[in-house]
Image (spheres, grey):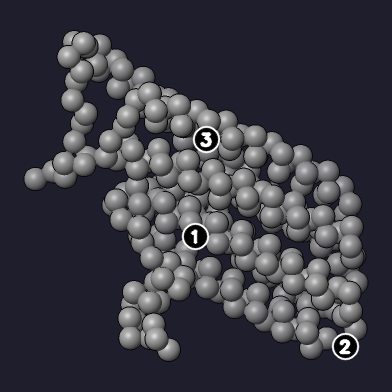
Amino acid sequence: MSDARDAAPRRPQSLDDAEFQETRIDFHNRLDELDDAFVAAGLRVADAVPRMSEGFLLGDEAVLDRADQMAVEVTMACEDVEDAGFVLLAREGPVGGDLRRLVALLRMTVDVSRSASLLRHACFTLNQFDPRFLDQPIRSQLEELARRSAEVFVAGMDAWRRRDALAVHDVDDADEAVDELQKVLLQQVVEADDVGTELLVLGLLARYYERIADHGVEIARDAAFVATGQRVPVGKQRVQAEFPDDRAS
């Protein structure tokens, strides 16, 4: 027996069957266009994270303009998706799977635009220090953190494109690894003898990359939401759901 939430909307009395079908086809075409625009923006960020992180670590100041332009254009694209999505929501009143998909798109535009801004912030720390002169252990750890963060974000986008309800668990596990890398990096920085004013900047960099990975998890989580209608617990929520007796500890 099908879920009533996923039932097709009733045909308004003012429309005959042909008109109603045409209206629904037009709605789905516009929803697909919004989805395509969102994916294009997300993939642009996914592509930019490793490339711009490499330029940043090489001390290439040209990355500043590229990161700024990318963040502005991605944010504008996400705002366009959001604006058109709210209009579609208000005019069409979708239900069931269509409603979940549209709500998820509206929510994920925030994840993509914020990730673009976080990458821009990371690149702009070039104005505060030169990463080429970092001690090799710290530099290697920062490179690894940037790479793993990009992988988590890409995995989140892949989960959305495939509507993979199970991928969120693997993406969440990968994000936990990013969290551990962040902790190791910060510990290395604290223990380094020749790190002074760079301490705060490196702490911010670690936070930026950790948050980009978090947004990748949220995108994978929305993929599961669209596929199943359930909000999958991640991070601390997942631990508490799996080990309820540990909540008080």
Q: Residues within 10 Å of mark 1 (few under 14, many from 20)?
A: many
- Residue 79 position by quadrant: top right
Task: Say which label, 3 or 2, has the lower sequence index.
Answer: 3
- Disc 3 to disc 2: CB gap under 8 Å: no
Residue 247 picture location, percent across and down: 39, 82
Residue for badge 1: 217
Do callouts 1 and 2 mark residues in contact (Cβ within 8 Å)?
Answer: no
Q: Nearer the viewer, mark 3 or mark 1?
A: 3
Q: Which mark is residue 82?
A: 3
Amino acid at dot 2 = Asp
- Residue at 19% across, 20% down: 11
Inter-mark Cα distance, 3 to 1: 20 Å
Q: Amino acid at mark 3?
A: Glu
Q: Residue at x 34, y 82 (%)?
A: 243
74 lies left or right of 194: left
Pointer 2: what residue? 193
